[in-house]
């Protein structure tokens, strides 16, 4: 389909608001890239600049190495699916999909074939004669997707297209979107604030904060090798547990300590924190890397505040030093409020962060 490059792209609104700051990115052909971040981080503005719906204040946007920075949307050969579907209510599903093809002055036979192919691909082939008011939200979103892929764009842009769907339909539709991407071999850029969507769909994830790129990597990279405290906290449900600790050496051992923890590190991790050279650190442990153990094997213990049964597992919450720590535990036996919880760590999965900068050690 296409490659996409953004080189030092910045977007300002007025003199003081910088929505996107010095954004650099290369998207190879056929990749499914997700822009992820909290509301207001600049991800939708970035997508709209790629589409030509917002003008870049600085920088260059290239599609297949052609500079499109100053081209209008219709000349960029991209399709965009919006959060609110944006289907025409007075047109049938067939006419919604065919509209852009007629503007291209395609012959009727080609339009008919393309409309039906796109409708079948998105699972709405039996709905072509209906009006949008006769469709569910999920079906309307499929119409928007079918309309976008019918024109066979170089880039397929999706701006939070699942946010108006209920939870169950969102899960089903994101699976369908990934399947459509694979069938069309499209180059896709998808915007979301939902990290579960990003992890499910992306070949790579771009995590943004305050208009800037914080980390780019595969779902595995951003989850297991988060570059800083922000990413480690933003990715994962429940998020990473953080503990302020001090580092000390004792008879050749490296230990992380605080009022409720005395953790001996293995040699690899011990060497890592010693090389860092600072005594005050932040220890990061994902909920699945805190392990329920017998009391004699525990490195910390605390009473259960609450246990949340999830069917396949339970989420156990305890309090340490005024912070809530969550553990993903087996579903049985269910832990009762007030019951003592004894924990150890999966030491090979721990993360360490600089306390001042928040950067990963």
Image (cartoon, rainbow, N blue to C red):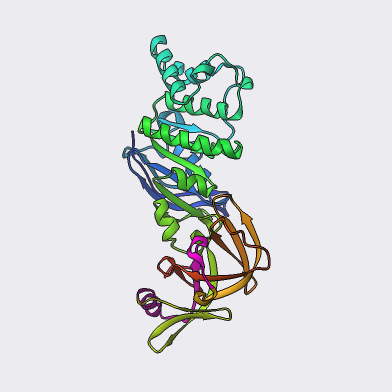
Query: Farthest residue in the top direction?
Result: 108
Position in image of residue 163 (x %, y %): 58, 39
Give the x, y percent position of residue 311.
58, 49
In the rendered image, the quadrant that contains the C terminus is bottom left
- Judge whether residue 337 can be spotted in this image: yes
Q: Quadrant of residue 339?
A: bottom right
Instruction: State the image quarter where residue 32 is shown.
Output: top left
Q: Position of residue 288 (x, y in %)?
A: 50, 60
Q: What are the residue bounds of the magenta stretch?
A: 268-294
Q: Is residue 346 left or right of residue 130?
A: left
- Count of numbered marks: 0
Q: Is residue 71 magenta?
A: no
The residue depicted at 42 percent of the width and 14 percent of the height is: 111
Task: Report the residue at 51% width, 53% height from top.
Answer: 211
- The front one of 184 and 349 is 349
Please say whether residue 45 is visible from this viewpoint. Answer: no
| 183 vs 18: above or below | above
Nearest the viewer among 259 and 86 is 259
Residue found 51% across the figure and 49% down from its top? 195
Q: Quadrant of the N terminus?
A: top left
């Amino acid at each position: 389909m296409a490659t996409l490059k953004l080189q030092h792209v910045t977007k300002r609104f007025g003199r003081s608001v910088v929505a996107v700051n010095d954004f650099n990115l290369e998207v190879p052909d056929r990749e499914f890239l997700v822009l992820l971040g909290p509301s207001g981080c600049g991800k939708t503005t970035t997508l709209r600049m790629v589409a030509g719906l917002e003008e870049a204040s600085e920088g260059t946007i290239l599609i297949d190495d052609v500079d499109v920075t100053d081209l209008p949307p219709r000349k960029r050969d991209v399709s965009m699916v919006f959060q609110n579907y944006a289907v025409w209510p007075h047109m049938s599903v067939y006419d919604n999909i065919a509209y852009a093809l007629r503007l291209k002055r395609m012959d009727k036979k080609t339009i008919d074939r393309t409309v039906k192919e796109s409708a079948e691909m998105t699972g709405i082939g039996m709905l072509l004669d209906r009006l949008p008011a006769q469709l569910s939200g999920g079906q309307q979103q499929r119409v928007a997707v079918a309309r976008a892929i019918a024109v066979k764009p170089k880039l397929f842009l999706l701006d939070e297209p699942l946010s108006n769907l209920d939870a169950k339909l969102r899960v089903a539709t994101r699976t369908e979107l990934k399947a459509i991407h694979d069938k069309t071999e499209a180059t896709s850029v998808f915007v979301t604030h939902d990290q579960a969507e990003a992890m499910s769909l992306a070949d790579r994830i771009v995590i943004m904060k305050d208009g800037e790129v914080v980390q780019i990597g595969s779902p595995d990279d951003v989850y297991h090798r988060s570059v800083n405290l922000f990413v480690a906290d933003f990715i994962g449900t429940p998020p990473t547990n953080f503990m302020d600790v001090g580092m000390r050496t004792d008879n050749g051992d490296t230990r992380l300590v605080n009022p409720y923890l005395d953790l001996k590190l293995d040699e690899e991790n011990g060497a890592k924190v010693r090389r860092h050279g600072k005594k005050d650190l932040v220890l990061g442990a994902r909920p699945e890397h805190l392990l329920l153990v017998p009391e004699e094997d525990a490195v910390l213990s605390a009473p259960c505040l609450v246990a949340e049964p999830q069917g396949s597992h339970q989420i156990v919450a305890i309090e340490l030093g005024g912070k809530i720590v969550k553990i993903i535990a087996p579903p049985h036996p269910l832990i009762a409020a007030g019951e003592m919880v004894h924990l150890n760590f999966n030491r090979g999965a721990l993360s360490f962060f600089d306390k001042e900068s928040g950067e990963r050690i």
